[in-house]
Image (tube, rainbow, N blue to C red):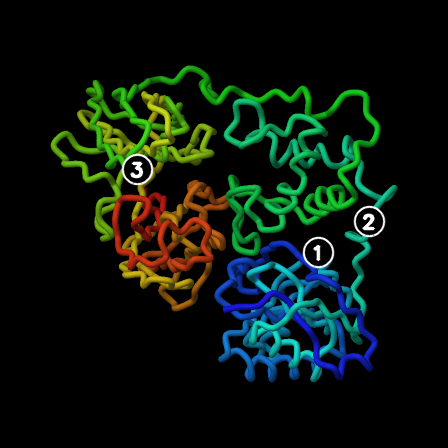
């Protein structure tokens, strides 16, 4: 493998063209397609080239162009060249899906609803085709479908390309006025950009926050602006993003196209300071993550102090904590305050019987009994967990708390003593919150970049689902939760299209989902064990189930209560 950029066939000289003196670098980007799959430019490094065509449902001339594009795909995909469509016309998702079905498009259609990828790649027309190099993140060719394009793909596949070629394209012009701004038309920092940062970023990116730098001034934003642009365009930030076309979750990160456009357009214009007397980011106040957000808890538990060495690999630590309750308690809210969040990778807490041998909650991939899962802590989880109204976790009299700690060393010896605060109902709520694990078995081959896994479970009783959580490790790629009703119809509930081991919340459904008795729930997903997964510790390894981060898990957690309660 590989090439850098492209010298073009001699026949192109007679065409209207521009040949750049050096490769045109595009940078990385990521988009979802029409079925919710995640596509990131840099993670196509296993392909010799990526051929991308701009598509528009409303462009009448695109049908013939699409047929030619499909023919190219048939010719080249067996030679390790990837083909994608991109829709930057800001069209309705239903119309895009219908067009794909009508035109029998066996192709992902990337949804560039913010039009920022079109701006980055300089796409201006439907029908325009680009040949991209996923290894150098550069553009090799921009122009129409034709012999010239085939020659360019050949040059890319052969690794002999050295320059970027641009030819005039026919097709319907795209309205890119929302992103074609510069100079005096750029968004204003104080009035436009700062409010977006306050709403979406600053609570983590603040002094003492979990973000790696504080977004507390124009100067800080300006200095970090290239990285901010990159993490927005690749959907790394804000964290906890899910597919917004499937359901709605009260704690997911939904950032609007308008907000993305505002920040990226401002950065592309040079991140100008504008005029203001007081920097809007300079005096923000946020609650102390080490304080009780809901007031003093009804009961506070401190875990035993754990000594964490500077280096090395630590086994999971399982701890049983006795409780003094002689009567049942119903938990309506819970908050964790980690002793040292720099080493506490995650913590799971369950309610267990006095003589129950606790296995850590994740010690086996098998799905068995429902559990009383109290709550967990993971990086970025700073808010108190409040259970849905009239729903709680039961602690029967005489039961205990069982906690599983996963610590990671960071080069500095430290200690952790995590505190747990519980808030109780005065009277028992109507429903008991339960959690069931739906897991899949797997053996991931070395260098597999899309190893699919699935698991399912049949609910014999009617239940109401209120939360869903995906759990994998470093090679986790995506996970989808869906239900199959007794009448055979199916419905997707949650799509985590770009799974990150660093962000594993329980996504709380804004509207709870009733599942009649006999509903089968499914968890499907994939692992990326390739060298192009930046989190992968070793792509040469065959990977199986295991507790440590360099091993893997595939578990979908369903939080629910029985409908008959």
Q: Where is residue 388 in the image (x, y as percent from the top left)?
A: 43, 36
> Where is residue 238, by image quadrant?
top right
- Neighbor class of circle 2 (other Cα within 10 Å; few <14, some 14-19, many 20+) is some
Label 1: state its secondary structure: helix
Q: Position of residue 207 (x, y in %)?
A: 57, 23
Query: Going from the N terminus, do you reach mark 2 or mark 1 first?
Result: 1
Residue denoted by label 3: 373
Q: Residue furthest right?
A: 184
Q: Position of residue 492 (x, y in %)?
A: 46, 59
> Where is residue 425, by image quadrant?
top left
Residue denoted by label 2: 181
Q: In this view, does 125 lie above or below 271?
A: below
Q: Distance between the residues labelled 1 and 3?
A: 45 Å
Label 3: state its secondary structure: strand
Query: Which residue sits at x=23%, y=31%?
Result: 402
Q: Is residue 53 left or right of residue 352?
A: right
Query: Going from the N terminus, do you reach mark 1 or mark 3 first?
Result: 1
Query: Going from the N terminus, do you reach mark 2 or mark 3 first?
Result: 2
Residue denoted by label 1: 120
Q: Where is residue 507 in the image (x, y as percent from the top left)?
A: 45, 43
- Neighbor class of circle 1 (other Cα within 10 Å; few <14, some 14-19, many 20+) is some
Query: Which residue sits at x=54%, y=74%?
Result: 81
């Amino acid at each position: 493998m590989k090439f850098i950029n492209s010298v073009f066939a001699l026949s192109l000289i007679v065409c209207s063209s521009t040949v750049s003196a050096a490769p045109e670098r595009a940078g990385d980007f990521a988009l979802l397609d029409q079925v919710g799959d995640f596509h990131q430019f840099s993670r196509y490094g296993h392909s010799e080239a990526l051929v991308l065509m701009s598509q528009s449902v409303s462009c009448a001339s695109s049908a013939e162009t699409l047929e030619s594009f499909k023919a190219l795909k048939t010719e080249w995909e067996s030679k390790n060249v990837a083909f994608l469509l991109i829709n930057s016309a800001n069209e309705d998702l239903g119309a895009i899906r219908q067009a794909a079905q009508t035109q029998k498009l066996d192709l992902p259609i990337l949804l560039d609803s913010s039009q920022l990828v079109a701006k980055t790649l300089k796409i201006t027309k439907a029908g325009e085709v680009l040949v991209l190099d996923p290894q150098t993140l550069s553009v090799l060719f921009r122009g129409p479908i034709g012999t010239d394009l085939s020659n360019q793909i050949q040059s890319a596949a052969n690794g002999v390309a050295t320059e970027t070629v641009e030819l005039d394209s026919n097709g319907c012009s795209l309205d890119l006025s929302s992103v074609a701004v510069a100079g005096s038309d750029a968004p204003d920092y104080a009035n436009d950009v700062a409010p977006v940062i306050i709403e979406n970023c600053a609570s983590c990116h603040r002094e003492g926050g979990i973000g790696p730098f504080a977004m507390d001034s124009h100067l800080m934003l300006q200095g970090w602006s290239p990285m901010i642009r990159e993490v927005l365009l690749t959907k790394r930030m804000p964290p906890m993003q899910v597919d917004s076309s499937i359901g709605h979750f009260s704690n997911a990160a939904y950032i609007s196209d308008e907000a993305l456009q505002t920040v990226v357009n401002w950065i592309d214009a040079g991140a100008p300071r504008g005029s203001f007397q007081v920097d809007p980011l300079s005096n923000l106040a946020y609650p102390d993550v080490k304080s009780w957000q809901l007031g003093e808890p009804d009961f506070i538990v401190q875990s035993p102090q754990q000594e964490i060495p500077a280096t090395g690999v630590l086994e999971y630590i399982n701890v049983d904590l006795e409780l003094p309750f002689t009567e049942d308690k119903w938990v309506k809210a819970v908050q964790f305050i980690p002793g040292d969040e720099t080493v506490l990778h995650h913590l799971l807490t369950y309610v267990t019987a006095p003589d129950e041998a606790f296995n850590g909650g994740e010690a086996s991939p098998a799905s068995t009994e429902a559990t009383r899962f109290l709550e967990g802590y993971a990086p970025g989880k700073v808010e108190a967990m409040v259970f849905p109204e009239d729903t709680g976790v039961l602690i029967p009299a005489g039961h205990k708390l069982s906690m599983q700690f996963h610590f990671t060393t960071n080069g500095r010896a430290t200690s952790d003593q995590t505190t747990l605060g519980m808030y109780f109902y005065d009277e028992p709520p109507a429903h008991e919150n339960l959690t069931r694990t739906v897991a899949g078995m797997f053996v991931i081959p070395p260098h597999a970049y899309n190893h699919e896994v699935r698991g399912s479970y049949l609910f014999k009783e009617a239940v109401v689902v209120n939360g869903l959580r995906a759990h994998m490790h470093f090679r986790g790629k995506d996970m989808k939760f869906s239900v199959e009703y007794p009448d055979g119809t199916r419905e997707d509930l949650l799509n985590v299209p770009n799974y990150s081991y660093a962000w594993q919340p329980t996504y709380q459904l804004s509207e709870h989902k009733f599942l009649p008795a006999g509903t089968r729930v499914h968890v499907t997903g994939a692992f990326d064990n390739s060298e192009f997964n930046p989190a992968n510790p070793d792509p040469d390894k065959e990977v199986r189930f295991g507790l440590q981060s360099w091993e893997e898990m595939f578990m979908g957690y369903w939080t629910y209560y029985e409908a008959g309660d």
